[in-house]
Amino acid sequence: MAAHKLLLLPGDGIGPEVMGEVRRLLAFIEQKGLLSFEIEEDLVGGAAYDVHKVAISDGAMAKAHAADAILFGAVGGPQWDGVPYDARPEAGLLRLRKELMLFANLRPAICYPALAASSSLKPELVEGLDIMIVRELTGGVYFGEPKTITDLGNGQKRAIDTQVYDTYEIDRIARVAFDLARVRRNRVTSAEKRNVMKSGLLWNEVVTATHKDGFEDVTLDHMLADALGMQLVRAPKQFDVIVTDNLFGDLLSDVASMLTGSLGMLPSASLGAEDPVTGKRAAMYEPVHGSAPDIAGKGVANPLAMLASVAMALKYSLGRPDLADTLDKAISEVLADGLRTGDIYTDGATRVGTAEMGQAVVAKFETLL
Ligand code: NAI
Ligand code: MG
């Protein structure tokens, strides 16, 4: 069995704590002979700055390029507030995204039945919710030129941002969405504003053409992005995969993720292009939450978002969707058993710390194999 190359980048704050639970899980998976790993580890964010005066070293970047999957904890914290802009902790994350060309950001919004009561929506609307937002991450209005603020000289200024999308950028993100739908519930909803935006017209046209190019087994719907926002809070379970641009994806993924209750529960993946020869694609998996400086070092952080990110790696990079499903199920059952870290604690539950939660997930995972 060929070993999968993993790079662990724990980062700052609670990053190293939740990454500790990843190591526990990976060790268990190897010990059971389910997969074999070649694990590298390096510094990122403030942890890298303290040693190298940069947010990620060239050496760590080289390891990132060689990895089959990168597992990233979290970066940032008030102690690095004064560092030079280019060396600030977030710069490490941005360099990884940019150099590895991670254009596809996958943010699942999963509502575990045991946590449905913590959602801002009625439990019956979100219980069992499992949707996937696929956000284009390297194009669109956040990057398009011109991007300027001009002083008009009459007491007025003019700000310009430019939404730019080329056919290839839309085509490749649509392919990611269709591929994902095939291992889910086989349905893609594409969102744009073709009624008022040229880029929306092109988005719609390209997604439709890509669909005809070998994905017709997947059901495709188009929805205006504002209408989709409304439907997300009205009846979120109607969706499977949603594919949209950088700006709409930023907004809609934040809305969708909060339907599920807690920040400590949400994983994400950022994927690059598939190499046409090797079939390999750069991929980084990370929790949505940050470094949580307020609870760092106390052993109380919720490791479930990080562990759910490992499940995404198993599914999309390591060729074991079966183990990913088992891991997701283990997380769900541990919650059903009443175990809660502080962030998701409710009366009557069993309060546990980071390590106990990680141990419980691994123990449950074993019973489900
Ligand atoms: P945050 O996500 O770190 O924390 C927000 C709140 O949620 C805090 O009260 C925290 O204790 C809690 N929380 C977050 N994750 C948790 C977990 N796994 N278990 C239990 N509680 C959890 O966001 P905040 O406070 O805005 O940012 C803190 C630092 O993290 C900043 O330096 C920020 O720039 C950075 N950050 C980094 C991200 C990344 O590495 N991808 C993403 C977001 C923020
Ligand atoms: Mg956002």
Image: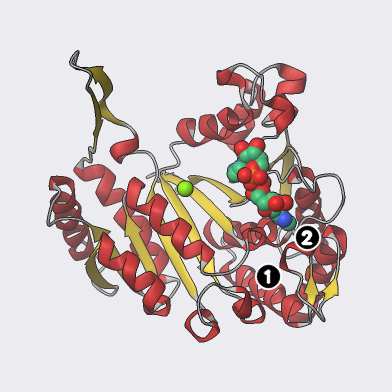
* Quarter of the picture holding the N terminus: bottom right
Is label 1's Cβ within 8 Å of ligand 1? no
Q: Does residue 324 lie above or below 203 as drawn?
A: below
In contact (CB < 8 Å): disc 2 and disc 1: yes
Q: Residue beneath label 1, please?
A: 327
Q: Residue beneath label 2, please?
A: 25
| Image coordinates for residue 244, horizontal then vertical, percent | 32, 55
Which mark is first along the chain, 1 or 2?
Answer: 2
- Disc 2 residue type (three-letter): Leu
The front one of 240 and 142 is 142
Residue for point 24% across, 71% down: 221
Give SS at disc 2: helix
* Quarter of the picture holding the C terminus: bottom right
Give SS at disc 1: helix
Indicate the colouring scheme. secondary structure
Q: Quadrant of residue 145?
A: top left
Residue for point 72% across, 33% down: 42
